[in-house]
Amino acid sequence: MAEKAKAAGKRVYHLNIGQPDIETPAAALQAMRETDLTVLEYSPAEGIFSYRQKLAQYYRQYEIAVSADQVIVTTGASEGLYFTLLSCLEPGDEVIIPEPFYANYNGFAHMAGVQVRPITSRIEDGFALPDAAAFAAAVTDRTRAILLCNPNNPTGCFYPRAALEALAEVVKAHDLFLISDEVYREFCFDGQEFVSVLNIPGLEEHAIVIDSVSKRYSACGARIGALVTRNESVLAAVSRFAKLRLGSPTLEQILAEALLDVDASYLETVHAAYDARRQTVYNRLRQMPGVVCYLPGGAFYSFARFPIDDADRFCQWLLEDFDYQGATLMLSPGAAFYATPGLGHNEVRLAYVIGVEKLEAAMDCLAHALQVYPGRVATNAAALAADVTAL
């Protein structure tokens, strides 16, 4: 639909996918170009050792004490998560995930034969992590793991230390794995201090971290991730799956290693850029009648409720039937981020991965679209919106 809209002459603002427009560090790209390899060989199954050493050093700045042998390089965070589910759960086992969650978690669970048990978080609470009692109540005799994304995709919610420590007690009480997707750790706002599950005492055998260079360094196409854990049995199991696929891409690991040498000012600049974009989207959304939103605490996503009949129809209508001054926008319908049927039907995810000027133009499109959309519904969300935007 987006390609047809472009072919018809419309400009499409892509807020539907977490593909940043920020440039990948030039020095790292140059380091990859200048490699003196004469044969492009398979990399070791667990990853190039010098890169794993540098990753272990990188984690120390977050007080995560791990060795290179406790890091396995994966072909993107996606493979790391898939290998984790295959290694830690049997077909028919259950993983608890707070929803809305990254839609591909459903796919990875299905591929592994694992059942997702969702716990619903609410926009009224800014999608805060449900309390530990809700997780404990969801545990069954087939539950083996809890999966989080912090800061969260798709909601942008930041989970603080206290919430993670309370959840850790549930993990230990039921002898579960705590799998934490931490690819957005650099993007925490408003002075909030990121805490990895690997920092929480008592989780040495429980905690597994999934990581990636994609968002941090705007290198989504590199497909280089990592799995980090102190659990030797998990490392051994994941290593066997890694050997089955031989190795992750060699040139991209050279790039990823060079990225770790990039000056800290790069990430500081990127952080400031995303913060400005976050504020832009939030301030514009809160001005739109009937929209319920909140100020995200991390990552680069906003998850909002619109006064519409159906988000799938709305997003399709934007591309097929709508334009404002020759432009429209592409959004992600909310239902795909839930496992519970019927939820998210009037919610959308917006990825603020384009510059502020373009975001302002996209918000102009959205504001006009919500006024003229044929499926707009009456809402009494004004009071609720006031409460939520105050979070």
Image (cartoon, grey):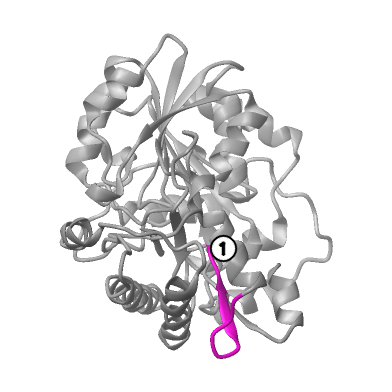
Percent x, y for residue 179? Answer: 43, 34
Residue 320, x across and y down, in percent: 67, 71
Position of residue 184 relative to residue 325, above or below, is above
Which residue corresponds to mark 1?
Answer: 315
| Residue 13 against residue 326 in the figure, above or below | above
From the viewer's perspective, tell me whether residue 301 is left or right of residue 166.
right
Reply yes or no: does residue 121 show up in magenta.
Answer: no
The magenta segment: 322-331
Q: Nearer the viewer, residue 95 or 339?
A: 339
Quadrant location, the C terminus: bottom left
Q: Mark 1 Cα within 10 Å, few/some/many (few <14, many 20+)?
A: some
300 and 312: which is toward the camera? 312
Is residue 211 shown to the viewer in this render? yes
Visible in this render: residue 213? no
Residue 280, placed above or below residue 43: below
Local SS, label 1: helix
Name the magenta segment's main secondary structure: loop
Horizontal side, residue 130 vs residue 206: left or right: left
Q: At 55% across and 74% down in the image, what residue appears?
A: 329
Question: Residue placed farthest to the top in the image?
Answer: 141
Q: Give whichever of 268, 152 is nearer the camera.
A: 152
How many tags in the picture? Answer: 1
Dividing the picture into quarters, in which one does residue 106 lie? top right
Q: Quadrant of residue 120?
A: top left
Q: Residue at x 67, y 36 (%)?
A: 242
Q: Is residue 104 left or right of residue 246?
A: left
Q: Quadrant of residue 272?
A: bottom left
Residue in the foreground of this view, choosing between 189 and 63: 189
User: Given the image, on which type of amino acid does mark 1 rest?
Assistant: Cys
